[in-house]
Amino acid sequence: MARYLLRRLAQVAVVVALVATIAFILIHLAPGDPFGAAMDNPNVTDAVRAQWRAAYGLDRPLPQQFASYLGSVARGDLGWSFSLQRPVIDVLRDALPNTLLLMSIALAASFSLGIALAIAQASRAGSVTDRVLGGISLFFFSVPEFWLALMIVVLLAYRFPIFPIGGMVDSVMHSSLTSWGKFIDVARHTVLPAATLTLLFSAVVARYQRAALLDVLPAEYVRTARAKGVPERSIVRRHALRNALLPVITLFGLAFPALLTGAVFVEKVFAWPGMGLVIVNSIESRDYPLLMASVIIGSVLVAAGSLLADLLYRVADPRIRDDR
């Protein structure tokens, strides 16, 4: 197990290094300039423009810029944000926990809801319940993230103003609330963005889990349990569900990039101060250091999710627990 874990961690390091290299090249070759607005200002002289570019190392050849960036990252320095005028690591320290909170809630809720829907469908395969739930999951499986987020805003924040429309806290009242009041304030602001991600991803989980359960339910050990008079509910939950979890565990590893991608749109719509909003703003402002750090953090999260899914797969399936 230890040898397998070390090998997988080495693969993760290689993947993250490749992603960082490709991202650095593409970001710097893309059209645009981080000082584009200021460069168009006729009051800014050529000497000042050259001074700005030299200060951030943008006047050097691309290989030298990349080598300098790698050296800074190795020392734990992710650079200086052009647009926010703050150390990049401070920006990420504020945004990353917010995205992890949103993703954790959406991940737990979507898998719980998706598996429950799949059990309800597979237990009544071909019935009206199965068809209705299948139609609902297909709808949420098909709609774009930003469209669903906008519809939820219109319905639950505009027509029926139950929850706050955006942000993570009430900017006016939050500082004066008690600890419990601050918790409730954050929880109320979390409902709409978390519900958007949950509805989208639970539909995916439900479709995969239903198909896996339908493959397992005709198995001989299930028929034997039925012949012994075991209730159908117990057969599905105690006998069939565990053997049908392997495809969903694989899906768990894919959930991280899907949720991170979905979070970019959802955080933008709900003004959630997380990594998605940081990525969008850094792209708009050509903030190279902040965008590079966001890409690296995103690739680490995706690789960590894939590694966690592989470990869960080995726990669930004894046939692949050897270290080959």
Image (tube, rainbow, N blue to C red):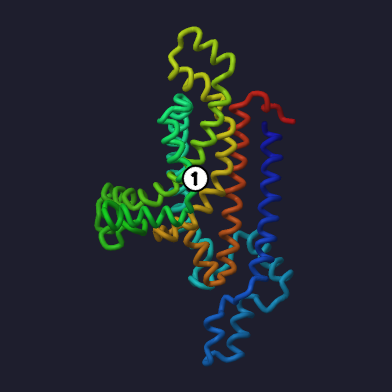
Residue at the image position 58 percent from the left and 67 percent from the top = 289
Look at 59% across and 27% down and name the residue there.
316
- Which residue lies under the disc numbered 1? 141
Front residue of 102/10: it is 102
187 relative to 278, above or below = above
65 over 195 or under it: above or below: below
Label 1's element?
A: helix
Q: Quadrant of the N terminus?
A: top right
Q: Residues within 10 Å of mark 1 (few under 14, many from 20)?
A: some
Q: Position of residue 57 (x, y in %)?
A: 65, 75
Q: Nearer the viewer, residue 257 or 117?
A: 117
> Which percent across, then down, holds residue 49?
59, 85
Q: Measuring from the top left, give residue 108's x and y in whole percent.
A: 45, 39
Q: Amino acid at mark 1?
A: Phe
The residue positioned 42% from the left and 53% from the top of the image is 148
Q: Nearer the viewer, residue 138 or 64?
A: 138
